[in-house]
Image (cartoon, rainbow, N blue to C red):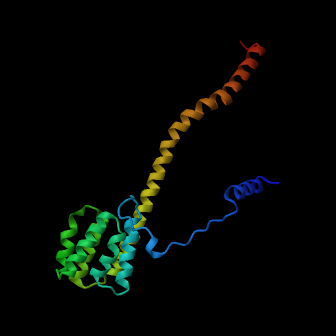
Amino acid sequence: MSLAAVLLAMAMLLTGGRVRTTRAPTADALPAPLAGDVDDPLAVASALDVFAACLSSGMAVAGAARATAPFAPQALADVLGRAADLLALGADAATVWTTADAVGDPRVDALCRLARRSASSGTALAQAVSDLADQSRRDAADSARAAAERASVLIAGPLGVCYLPAFVCLGIVPVVVGLAGDVLQSGVW
């Protein structure tokens, strides 16, 4: 009898043969979105994708910003929430996105510039926001690649310190001792 069968039999004895099932979570049981709890480099890109999808589907900018804000990181959520409120009140779009410039996040600042440009020139905002999300993803990938390269450089030092003495003691010293023994026995000295 295999170990797995023995463990299964013990589990059946301990639980009395009852099997517990779980139900799939309903929409009411899903957790609320966590805005800004984790420093995810791709969170802004995914929020910008949601914003672009809302705009592409024909939603007004205020509605799209309101729909995106709960799922965005905190800095972007604040800007989108404020913009949605001001646009719903009838504020000028160029003014709404100008006041949001003080966040300091370059991706949020880029979104504000795109929205101001769209408001003044009438260009479509959805494609520009989608391009900004793609750029944000590329920046996150470049940042991850640079961190991995830094880690590989930092790991090389301790590995060299650990393995080099072992290599010398186990690889080079026996060869030198063996050659020295042969040289001393041959009478060259």
Residue lying at 25% horizontally and 85% vertically, measured from the top left: 122
Between 135 and 35, the one lying in front of the other is 35
Residue lying at 42% horizontally and 57% vertically, measured from the top left: 143
Residue lying at 41% horizontally and 60% vertically, measured from the top left: 40
Residue sitting at the far front? 16
- In the rendered image, residue 160, in percent from the top left (x then y), is placed at 55, 36
Q: Quadrant where the N terminus lies?
A: bottom right
Which image quadrant for residue 186? top right
Q: How many marks?
A: 0
Task: Using the rendered image of the protein, determine whether residue 130 is visible from the camera's viewpoint.
Answer: no
- In the rendered image, residue 129, in percent from the top left (x then y), is placed at 34, 76
Is 9 situated above or below 136? Answer: above
Residue lying at 52% horizontally and 37% vertically, measured from the top left: 158
Instruction: Describe residue 167's horizontal placement relative to residue 112 as left or right.
Output: right
Between 1 and 111, the one lying in front of the other is 1
Which image quadrant for residue 11? bottom right
Instruction: Describe residue 141's horizontal placement relative to residue 179 as left or right.
Output: left
Between 46 and 184, the one lying in front of the other is 46
Is 177 situated above or below 99? Answer: above
Task: Using the rendered image of the protein, determine whether residue 152 is visible from the camera's viewpoint.
Answer: yes
Q: Quadrant where the C terminus lies?
A: top right
- In the rendered image, residue 50, in percent from the top left (x then y), is placed at 39, 76
Residue sitting at the far bottom? 58
Instruction: Describe residue 6's horizontal placement relative to residue 118 as left or right.
Output: right
Is 76 situated above or below 177? Answer: below
- In the rendered image, residue 82, in percent from the top left (x then y), is placed at 23, 72
Which image quadrant for residue 44? bottom left
